[in-house]
Image (cartoon, grey):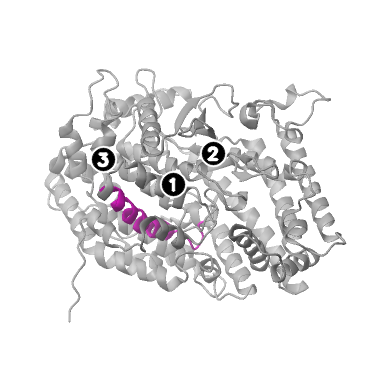
Amino acid sequence: MAETNMESNNRENPFFVPYDTPHHTIPFDRITLKDIEEAFIEGIRRDKEQMEKTINNPEKPTFENTILNIDDDPFYYGLLDRVSNAFFNLLSAETNDEMDALAQKIEPLLTQHHNDMLLNSQLFERIKAVHRHHRRLTPEEKRLLDNIYESFCRNGALLDDEGKSRLRQMNEEASMLSLQFSQNLLNERKAYILHLTNETDLDGLPDRVREAAAQEAKEKGLEGWVFTLDSPSLGPFMKYSNRRDLRKQLYFASNTLCTHETPTNNVDICKRLITLRGESARLLGFKSFANYIMKHRMATNTRNVYRLFDQLIDAYKPTALKEVAEIAKTARKSEGRSFTMEPWDLSHYSYKLKMSKYDIDSEMVRPYFELSRVIEGVFGLANRLYGITFKENKSIPVYHPDVKAYEVFDKDGSYLAVFYADFHPRKGKRGGAWMTSYQGQFINRKGENVRPHVSVVMNLTKPTDSKPSLLSLGEVETFLHEFGHSLHGMFANTRFESMSGTNVWWDFVELPSQFMENYSIEKEFLRTFAFHYETGEPLPDELINRIVRSRNFMVAYGCLRQVSFGLLDMAYYTLREPFTDDLMAFEKKAWEKALVFKQQPGTCMTVQFSHIMAGGYAAGYYSYKWAEVLEADAFSVFKKNGIFDPSTAQRFRDCILSRGGTEHPMTLYKQFKGSEPTIDALLRRNGIRRRKKKE
């Protein structure tokens, strides 16, 4: 972003005029924080102006003059969307203290404005009139109208004035708490470092890990080695380090974030968020927040979610217990019969067991997963499946030098999308990986197909002074996962932006992303890009075979870990009363039946569980396992027809990826598959057998 002090008094705010950039991409290099704040204020004013025009329209309410507002200038009235897309994406990928402060200032204004729109009785009366009496609509128009009507109802339009006032207060409080939760977590995660100056403390760490830690120290102006809580640093240390005391130290640093008696403690924030969401749902006529959420989910109700969890626990827990017992046995062989394995030992000894069983380790494959080659491989996969191509365009402005911007072209050579890729950790970026959009796809009033601008943001292993960025297999899977989301965005082909791309029901959105992960261990795919970064030699078949044989290593434990997160989420949001319990005690009980290890005293997942506190997955974390059933079932079709089969890929694109939320997700899935999914494909892939029920 541009520096504020470089601006001229008579320059025009970049958000107020069409972007004079390739494909009208955001001119990050010319935007200042002052521009952003000004655009938010003006965008809210224009939104209110449009609402007043709609309310005061003397004509009978119609789909055109109330839902589409066809006489209004879409660029003029689209200002708030433009600035919101830019700012809130940057807040996750490239924030700083000034941006955080602006977010604290803007968030209550946006929430108030959101409430002003959705709780306006005059506007709702026009929408209700159109919903009851309208011309013959296309299926997509009808779905848009239903979505808007439902959105108003679900946001309090049917409440009396007292109820609207109370809902408004709760919404405003919850939005600020969610923002504070995220800022607290980011600040604590980035503040922690493990600074080592004695080389003996590095016992067991591979040279690559040592070099990365030395680079981290150098960047921080320190001698020795620095380890952080970012995944590319934390993960390898927990896996390789022979220093059990330091592994324990990092484990507790990571698992006690935001629990300490500091201003960044999230305990009370979480308790209040849970209470507010429950109370708002009950005010709207639902028994719990989960019931409120399930109305627009494939799962339909909480019973179906718990049924899935019970099926998975029943199928996977016996295997998970055996997996952990085998790791503990490995640890005792190394440390003695009296050794008791703890959670900070799991990664370390599971690595040793995996090596003894399969002779495979991420350090063996990293030299074959050099980032630029992986990019070629992932883009090549999209080309082979769908015929699309990627071309880097350095004229497209980016918000940080790490970011690469690509033009994407369809198989007929036509322009399809802009794709941003942001690969490595840095101070202003939150942890994890995600896909987002800076511009959604839609058909404008001239009939032009406005193409999307999508972004993938990750925290992959950084290059060092002597080595390029070399990825683990898990990081390749992460790339494929987020790239799957981006394909969902790039292939969008709907009339209305609110239903395009990833604007689908939450338990359907992970299908395209988790589907792509399947390719990470397919030999035909690996052979297209996995070459040694120094010698150019391809990844040996023997190593690929070991990767394939080891794919289900700890798969049951991993499944139960995801189920435990889902159980925790549902426990909070199925509550029918305000949350008054001890947070840590509640957490311990909520996910207990899916845990293989006992929870350590003082640790707490909830206070850093961004998905369900600030990330939109509240009462929806089960979606990952729900979608895993879908994607395993879908990939079985590709396995049958050929993993690169163009006709199957085209059907997947036409039925799933391009349709967004224009139809019920199960309808779309059955159009692709021909039948509803079952859990069987997932069990077969994971090598899990159903336990026979006793007669």
- State the residue in front, 277 or 215: 277
Q: Are marks 3 and 2 in contact (CB under 8 Å)?
A: no
The image quadrant of residue 268 is bottom right
Q: Position of residue 99 (x, y in %)?
A: 65, 38
Q: Which mark is residue 522?
A: 3
Residue ID for mark 1: 653
Q: What residue type is labelled 1?
A: Arg
Q: What residue type is labelled 3?
A: Glu
Residue drawn 28% across and 18% down? 534
Is 625 colored magenta in this rendering?
A: yes
Secondary structure state at the residue bearing disc 3: loop
Q: Distance between the residues labelled 3 and 1?
A: 20 Å
Q: Is residue 338 left or right of residue 429?
A: left
Q: Do the residues labelled 2 and 1 touch (CB within 8 Å)?
A: no
Secondary structure state at the residue bearing disc 1: helix
Whether 480 is drawn above or below 400: the answer is: below
The crowding category of the residue bearing disc 2, from other C-alpha atoms within 10 Å (few below 14, some 14 to 19, many at least 20), is many
Q: Which amino acid does label 2 sit on?
A: Val
Q: Which span of residues is magenta-colored?
A: 617-639
Q: Where is residue 159 in the image (x, y as percent from the top left)?
A: 72, 73
Residue ID for mark 2: 454
